Image (cartoon, rainbow, N blue to C red):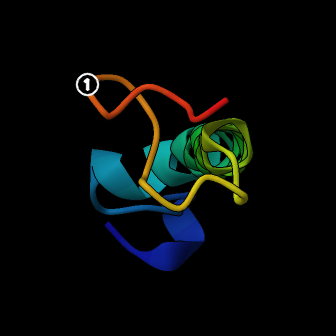
C-alpha cells in the first residue's frame, strides 16, 4: 500500500490518539482541581496536619 492509496495511519493506536488525548486532558484537570480542593480543605492554618486520623483541632 502506498500513501497515495489513502492509508493515513499504519497502526490503530495512531488513529485512536485524537480521541484519547482530550480524555487525558479532562482527567488531568479534574485531578488538579481535586488536589487543590483537598489541600485547601485541610487548612493551611492547622499546624498539626489536620485531616482524618490527626489530632483534634485546638479550641
Nearest the eye: 43 or 3: 43
Q: Residue at x 31, y 45 (%)?
A: 12
Number of marks in picture: 1
Taking the image as shown, residue 45 lies to the left or right of residue 49, namely: right
* Furthest residue in direction bottom, as rendered: 3
From this view, report whether residue 20 is shown above or below residue 39: above
x and y percentages locating residue 48 in the rendered image: 42, 54
In this rendering, the answer to whether 55 lies above or below 2 is above
Q: Residue at x 32, y 51 (%)?
A: 13
Above-or-below relation of 44 to 24: below
Q: Position of residue 36 (x, y in %)?
A: 70, 51
Residues packed near mark 1 inside 10 Å, few (<14), some (14 to 19) or many (20 plus): few
Q: Secondary structure at mark 1?
A: loop
Where residue 24 sits: x, y (%)? 55, 46
Closer to the camera in the image, 51 or 33: 51
Which quarter of the rendered picture does the C terminus lie within?
top right
Question: Which residue lies at the image location 31% right of the left edge and 66% below the top edge?
Answer: 1
Report whether 42 appears left or right of 7. right
Between residue 45 and residue 29, name the one nearer to us: 45
Q: Which residue is mark 1?
A: 53
| Depth order, front residue of 58/45 | 58
Amino acid at each position: 500500500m502506498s500513501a497515495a492509496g489513502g492509508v493515513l495511519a499504519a497502526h490503530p493506536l495512531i488513529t485512536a490518539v485524537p480521541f484519547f488525548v482530550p480524555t487525558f486532558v479532562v482527567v488531568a484537570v479534574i485531578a488538579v482541581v481535586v488536589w487543590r480542593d483537598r489541600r485547601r480543605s485541610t487548612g493551611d492554618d492547622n499546624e498539626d496536619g489536620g485531616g482524618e486520623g490527626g489530632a483534634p483541632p485546638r479550641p
